[in-house]
Every structure is written in structure tokens, then in C-alpha cells.
Image (tube, helix red, strand yellow):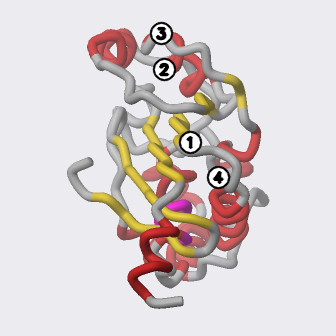
Amino acid sequence: MSEINRISQDVGVRVILLCHAETKATASTTFPGDEPLTARGRARAAELTAPRAELLLHAPSTQCRETAEALGLDARAEPALNGCDHGIWRGRAIDDVLSTEHEALTRWLTDPSAAPHGGEPVTGLIKRAGAWLDGLDRVNSVLAIAEQSFIRAALVHAIDAKPSCYWRIDIAPLERVVLTGRIGRWHLRVGA
């Protein structure tokens, strides 16, 4: 099979990853938890027109469910879209963790397989996000409202980047990322 034929077959699934709207954690430098949207986040989500998709999903967290509701979507909860489990750091300000657990935070930021917080290592999150992406072989289009950390991990998997690249990706509330492709061969669409 020629490369052109293979590429044309690989664009069968369109995955739109939409980051949830603003919460207190995203408005500050805090490890996220399960929290409601801010009034501003809810209002901004309500102003958006949701992209069309065959399958509508959201992470089970309050912020993702409330974002789907603000968009007027009848989306179902998908546990695989959960953000990173930050363990004992969940809900804590990053400056607080830095001042009390400097070495542990440094280890986490430099070693994607480390989980000094007792939660999920970045490599585990990337593997989970990749398994979810690569399992989307029976749909044409998906809109998934997810946590920032999940979207970052999905991007690392999709472009086959090193796990250490995870920390170099910024995803703002209500930003969307579009991936097209098939199992194991994903393409990042910029400006889509």
C-alpha cells in the first residue's frame, strides 16, 4: 500500500478534545480537583457553539459535566477521560507544594514516571489517554470535554512525543485540540 493511500485511510476518525471551562484551580496555580465552574467559566461556555460530533463525551468530573451542560450537550460520562490523579496534592496551591515538598515536586516535574504525590504518574496518564484514543475505531467523530492534563497526555501520545514533553504543553479553559487519524497514527490539526 502506498504512503498516500495509507494516509488517506488514516483520517477516518476526528477527535475534538475540548478543555472544560474555568474553575478556581485553572484561574490560579492550583493542582485541580473535582470542582464547579466559576461564574465566568459557565458564562463563557454558554456563549460557545459546540462542535458537531457523532459521539459526545465528558470526563466524570464536575467541571467537565458542567461545561457540557453549559454548552447544551447531552454528553455521557466517560471515566477514561479523567484528568491526572494528583494524589495528596489535589486542591493544593503549587507554591504551597513547592515550599513544603520541593524535592518531590522537582522529581515529579523532571521524571514522568514519578508519582511522589501518591497518585498517577504522567507516564500512566499518557498510556491511559493513548489507549482511549486508539480504541476509537468504530466512530467517525468524537467531541470529548476533558481535563487539561488528559488533553496534554493525549497530545503527547498522538504526536509520539517523549513523555517529558507533557509539561511543555499548555491548554487553556475552553481551548480545543483536533486530532484526526486511526489507531496508532494520529495527526494534530492546528486552527481547526
Tell me which numbered mark, 4 or 3, is placed earlier along the sequence: 3
Q: Which residue is mark 1?
A: 92
Tell me which numbered mark, 2 or 1, is placed earlier along the sequence: 2
Asked which secondary structure carries label 1, the reply is loop
Q: Is residue 65 above or below residue 43?
A: below
Give, as a three-letter code, the residue at label 3. Answer: Gly
Q: What is the distance, in whole Å, between disc 4 and disc 1 at their CAs?
A: 14 Å
Tell me which numbered mark, 2 or 4, is placed earlier along the sequence: 2
Tell me which numbered mark, 3 or 1, is placed earlier along the sequence: 3
Give how far across and how far down residue 10 sits, in percent: 51, 68
Q: What is the distance, in whole Å, between disc 2 and disc 3 at their CAs?
A: 9 Å
Q: Which residue is mark 3?
A: 72
Looking at the image, is mark 4 or mark 1 nearer the viewer? 4
| Label 2 Cα neighbours within 10 Å, binned few <14 / some 14-19 / many ≥20 | many
Give, as a three-letter code, the residue at label 2. Answer: Thr
Q: What's the residue at 45%, 43% (across, down)?
A: 16
* Residue 136 part of the magenta-drawn span: no
Q: Quadrant of residue 184?
A: bottom right
Residue stretch rendered in magenta on the structure: 153-157
| Label 1 Cα neighbours within 10 Å, binned few <14 / some 14-19 / many ≥20 | some
Q: Quadrant of residue 112?
A: bottom right
Q: Which residue is mark 2?
A: 67
Contact (Cβ within 8 Å) of mark 2 with mark 3: no
Asked which secondary structure carries label 3, the reply is loop
Asked which secondary structure carries label 2, the reply is helix
Q: Which residue is mark 4?
A: 84
